[in-house]
Image: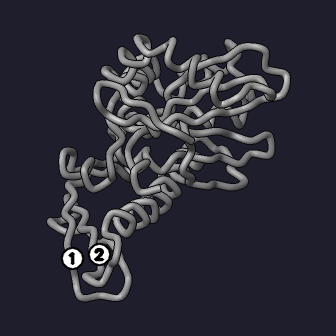
Amino acid sequence: MFSILINDEPVPVEVKRRKGTRHLRLSLNHYNVVVVSVPWQCSDREALKFVEKQRAWLEQQIARTPQALTLCQWLTEHPELSGSGDRFVVRIESAERLRADYIFDAGGAEIVLRLPKTSHDTDLALLQLVKRFAKDALGCRVAYHAKRLNLEVSKLSVRDQVSRWGSCSISGGISLNWRLVLVAPELQDYVILHELAHLTEMNHSHRFWSLLDHYDPNRAVHEAQLDAQTAEVMRVGRCEL
């Protein structure tokens, strides 16, 4: 890993060597790290030379790419979390307690994220707590939709995927990205229903899309709205890692 200056700011560069790769390729991941995919025998010097040749393209990409934010920064700008089909106003408190937890307040309209005053890393403690909330909230929402649609999920996991919102295994297990609690309830439901549809159709055939349209009549709108937010939301919480 090394870095280059783009618009007077250091940008990390990661070289990934792949067997069977013939060409050099450049991309910007959700950590805003420049990734150079190169043939196995390619030297760092050649990779850096290639990056320099693509400087103009990189400058354009970085200029229009959202910044990677801590969860604390995100919640300061967007103090809301989604769960159970609702949107909750977020309040963060520092309290004399041994373990972080969350409670609901204001008649269930607010979620209070309570962090121990003794936390050495507040950003990390907040991230871990919201992931715990995501596991609880997404688990309940999946169970609700599965029961409503008479479907059976063999296993649910809530993870920190790099770029995917969710996935469904052939054994009936569903995996969801914890960041789904950061988007609107209807977009969260869209992803859940998308993965539930895969329990019946393990593909993206015409039958799959017809089934998903039945599950979510506003599927096309929700898909477009989520796509428009993905680059920004997927970069939340990368700074704490």
> Which SS class for mark 1?
strand
Q: Quadrant of residue 24?
A: top right
Could you say where residue 14 lies in the image, as x and y percent from the top left? 58, 36
> Which SS class for mark 2?
strand
Q: Which mark is residue 198?
A: none
Observer-nearest of 67 and 225:
67
Rendered image coloring scheme: one colour
> Vertically, is 50 above or below 194?
above
Decide if residue 187 is on the left or right side of residue 48. left
Q: Quadrant of residue 172?
A: top right
Residue ID for mark 2:
115
Residue ID for mark 1:
94
Observer-nearest of 232 and 20:
20
Please, what is the three-letter code of the amino acid marked with disc 1?
Ser
**Quadrant in which the N terminus appears:** top right
User: For the point 66% across and 25% down, which residue is it?
Assistant: 37
Q: Residues within 10 Å of mark 1 (few under 14, many from 20)?
A: some
User: For the point 24% across and 88% down, which residue is it?
Assistant: 96
Q: Are marks 1 and 2 in contact (CB under 8 Å)?
A: yes
Question: Looking at the image, is mark 1 or mark 2 earlier in the sequence?
Answer: 1
Q: CA distance from mark 1 to mark 2?
A: 5 Å
Decide if residue 212 is on the left or right side of residue 19. left
